[in-house]
Amino acid sequence: MASTDAAMAALDAAQKTLDKTLAQAPSPGWLQPWSPDLVQFLAIGVLLFSFAALLLCTLLLWRSKAPPSQVLRIFGVISILGLSALLLVVGYSNEQLTPIVGLFGAIAGYLLGKDARSREEE
């Protein structure tokens, strides 16, 4: 019985120590691993990369005289990827990001699947 009381007392002391430690630690919601300058740099980098990819695709599609559906598909997919990467970099929470990425996925599925359906009907 004495060993049980000693174990319970040790457990209570450990719990109080843990509670004190957790109370002194900053909450996880306040921790931001990226500085605002780094987020700004990455956001500008993602935007510039997406813009450069769109310019390159414009040049290649113009030279190959691609049909409008192909232009829409390429521009749509590159724009969706660039905007998704931008949203990830600027640090929206999961609750805010999930519906946006779902919408982008639906648009990408429509763009990529639209032409395949019309080929099957022919």
Image (cartoon, rainbow, N blue to C red):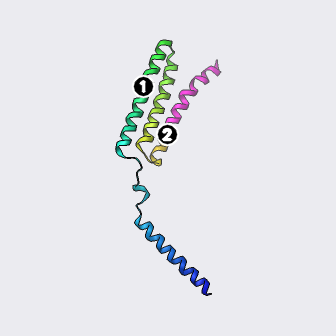
Q: Position of residue 5 (x, y in %)?
A: 58, 84
Assign the magenta stretch its main secondary structure: helix
Tell me the SS state at disc 1: helix
Residue 92 image label: none
Q: Identify which residue is drawn at 42% across, 45% down.
A: 92
N-terminal label among 2 and 1: 1
Up/down of 112 relative to 100, above or below: above
The quadrant of the rendering that contains the N terminus is: bottom right
Among the 4 quarters of the image, the one containing residue 112: top right
Near mark 2 (Cα within 10 A), the count class, few <14, some 14-19 or many ≥20, is: some
Amino acid under label 1? Answer: Ala
Residue position marked by numbered label 2 in the rendering: 101
Q: Position of residue 40 (x, y in %)?
A: 36, 40
Tell me the SS state at disc 2: helix
Q: Position of residue 16 (x, y in %)?
A: 47, 74
Q: Identify which residue is drawn at 51% across, 74% down.
A: 14
Q: Position of residue 68 (x, y in %)?
A: 49, 17
Among the 4 quarters of the image, the one containing residue 24: bottom left
Q: Nearer the viewer, mark 2 or mark 1?
A: 1
Residue position marked by numbered label 1 in the rendering: 52
Magenta residue check for 104? yes
The quadrant of the rendering that contains the C terminus is: top right
Q: Which residues are magenta?
A: 101-122
